[in-house]
Image (tube, grey):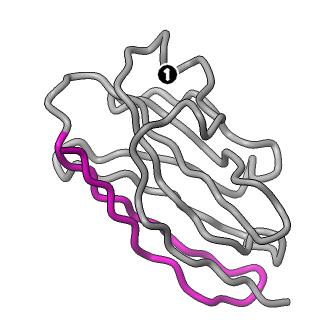
Amino acid sequence: QVHLAESGGDSVQAGGSLRLSCGVSGYTASSYCMGWFRQTPEKNREGVAAMTNGGINTFLSTTVKGRFSISHDGAKNTLYLQMNSLKPEDSGMYFCAARLGDLYTCNHGSNQPESYDSWGQGTQVIVSS
């Protein structure tokens, strides 16, 4: 059974940084896709960044380009989201997600929540101005 567990959410001032972590367990396949999504009461869940477990980035939202980066530590089976220069509009609940797939699969729908079948519980990020 696949299990995802996020951590690292916090309340920070605008301009600050946070690093979110997502522990991934339960995958026996060699190739899978992972992503970070965020959601607020005003917006549907939106894709932030995505990559393959092999280290290939497949998506980065234009709203975070230049400020956020996604990475994966295979030895620790942990997905990260480094968030710098945070803005109030980055506030929300951040979720990590995963699905089986090769590079071709991961490149399609990588920013679409409906493409993923395993989700973590989420971690809250609050950015104050």
Image quadrant holding the N terminus, namely top left
Name the image quarter holding residue 50: top right
Q: Position of residue 62 (x, y in %)?
A: 81, 43
Q: Position of residue 102 (x, y in %)?
A: 38, 14
For residue 40, above or below residue 25:
below
- Residue at left offset 76%, top offset 79%: 15
**Tag 1's secondary structure?**
helix
Horizontal placement of 37 versus 14: left or right?
left
Q: Residue furthest top?
A: 104
Q: Position of residue 129 (x, y in %)?
A: 85, 89
Q: Residues within 10 Å of mark 1 (few under 14, many from 20)?
A: many
What's drawn in magenta, residue-wise? 1-26
Give the mark count. Answer: 1
Horizontal placement of 127 versus 109: left or right?
right
Along the viewing direction, whichever of 57 and 31 lies nearer the viewer: 31
Say what amino acid the circle numbered 1 marks.
Cys
Residue 94 is covered by the magenta coloring: no
Along the viewing direction, whichever of 64 and 121 lies nearer the viewer: 121
For residue 51, above or below residue 21:
above
Horizontal placement of 118 versus 70: left or right?
left
Q: What secondary structure is the magenta-colored segment mainly?
A: strand
Q: Position of residue 49 (x, y in %)?
A: 60, 43
- Residue at left offset 82%, top offset 60%: 43
Residue 19 is covered by the magenta coloring: yes
For residue 94, above or below residue 61:
below
Along the viewing direction, whichever of 121 and 13 lies nearer the viewer: 121
Q: Which residue is mark 1?
A: 106
- Residue at left offset 39%, top offset 32%: 99
- Residue at left offset 66%, top offset 48%: 48
